[in-house]
Image (cartoon, rainbow, N blue to C red):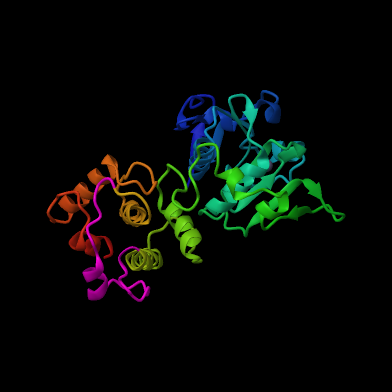
């Protein structure tokens, strides 16, 4: 959703832990003649923060954010691109003074289902263009470009797989203490993160639109059925329908558990709007608190143990 900010009055308004409004307005774009009204898509700081935390960054700099149409043309844009809509940034991330290469950022963004990614932005291997098209404002199709490479016709080359294109391995993107993709996507638990995780874990093709609807609910039940089969030998049909057999196969999921079972539990809770702390497959205090709150809200015994009745309510 686009929100509008006054400039410079809102300059220091925090949009996320590490980004303020002023950073979305760039001196070099305007030569001091700033616009007084700045549109910023609320998804943008959310995504920036996910990258920042995933790579354990200590510094993030927006090199170019919102641009007026004239400003966009003056820096070589079309005058109507994503930067003019307030849905794009060109950004540099660093950890302890060392740049996080754009290829790693691009691969991570691809895994998150981000539609607008420009590698090596402006020809700099540490710069990345990120735009949040597809989340409501600009429903353009995927644009995975490589801003450093332009073909003979003057078009940016389109990249569908940044891992392959840049020769990057999964372990490079999910190393240095950051979460492994199989169990954890991020510390930012949103419905979209759950959808991306379900797609990766169970080979599904859910729309990663951040909306908890019937399809996502069925995918979660399928995930639960897979876990019950693998963990307890339940022999269920993974059909996404929570019936009597599935209910009967449920064993209590308790605090202190780690792995696929608590991951599914957290995923359900996140989709139901409960705060589990991080989506990390670790049934700790915050997940227990979320279970207790959910049980209270549903009139169940609030013991913090997710059993048959709790999963039945989560799957509704
Ligand atoms: Zn850009």
Residue at horizontal 25 percent and vertical 55 percent from the top: 253
Residue 243 is inside the magenta segment: yes
Q: Position of residue 237 (x, y in %)?
A: 35, 76
Q: Which quadrant would residue 250 be assigned to in this image?
A: bottom left
Q: Position of residue 165 (x, y in %)?
A: 72, 53
Kindly identify the residue that appears in the image at 23 percent across and 50 percent down. Answer: 291
Q: Position of residue 276 (x, y in %)?
A: 32, 45
Can residue 8 be spotted in the picture? Answer: yes
Q: Is residue 215 left or right of residue 316?
A: right
**Looking at this rendering, what residue extends furthest in the right direction?**
152
Q: Magenta part of the protein: which range?
A: 231-256
Residue drawn at point x = 23 percent, y = 64 percent:
312
Quadrant assignment for ligand 1: top right
Q: Which quadrant: the C terminus?
A: bottom left
Between residues 266 and 78, which one lies in front from this camera angle? 266
Is residue 44 rendered magenta in the image? Answer: no
Q: Closest to the observer: 45 or 56?
A: 56
Q: In the image, residue 15 lies at what x, y percent?
A: 46, 34
Picture layout, residue 146 above or below residue 231: above
Where is 73 relative to 302, above or below? above
Q: Does the rendering let one see residue 209?
A: no
Picture quarter containing residue 94? top right
Of residue 89 and residue 235, the one placed in the foreground of this image is 235
287 shown above or below 65: below
């Amino acid at each position: 959703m686009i929100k509008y900010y006054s400039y410079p009055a809102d300059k220091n308004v925090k949009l996320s832990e590490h980004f303020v409004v002023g950073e979305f307005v760039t001196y070099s774009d305007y030569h001091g003649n700033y616009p007084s009204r700045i549109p910023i898509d609320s998804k943008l700081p959310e995504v920036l923060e996910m990258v920042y935390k995933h790579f354990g960054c200590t510094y993030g700099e927006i090199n170019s954010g919102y641009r007026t149409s004239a400003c966009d043309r003056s820096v070589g844009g079309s005058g109507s691109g994503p930067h003019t809509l307030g849905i794009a940034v060109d950004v540099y991330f660093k950890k302890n003074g060392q740049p996080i290469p754009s290829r790693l950022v691009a691969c991570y963004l691809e895994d998150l289902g981000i539609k607008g990614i420009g590698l090596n932005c402006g020809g700099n291997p540490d710069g990345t263009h990120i735009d949040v098209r597809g989340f409501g404002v600009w429903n353009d199709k995927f644009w995975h470009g490589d801003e450093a490479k332009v073909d003979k016709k003057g078009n940016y080359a389109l990249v569908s797989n940044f891992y392959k294109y840049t020769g990057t391995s999964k372990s490079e993107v999910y190393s240095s203490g950051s979460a492994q993709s199989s169990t954890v996507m991020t510390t930012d638990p949103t419905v979209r993160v759950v959808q991306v995780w379900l797609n990766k874990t169970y080979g599904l093709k859910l729309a990663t639109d951040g909306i908890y609807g019937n399809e996502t609910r069925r995918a979660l039940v399928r995930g639960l059925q897979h876990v019950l089969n693998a963990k307890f030998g339940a022999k269920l049909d993974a059909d996404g329908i929570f019936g009597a057999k599935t209910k009967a196969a449920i064993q209590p999921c308790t605090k202190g558990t780690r792995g696929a079972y608590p991951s599914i539990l957290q995923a359900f809770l996140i989709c139901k709007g409960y705060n589990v702390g991080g989506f990390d497959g670790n049934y700790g205090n915050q997940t227990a608190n979320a279970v207790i709150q959910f049980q209270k809200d549903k009139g169940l015994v609030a013991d913090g143990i997710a059993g048959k009745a709790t999963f039945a309510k989560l799957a509704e």
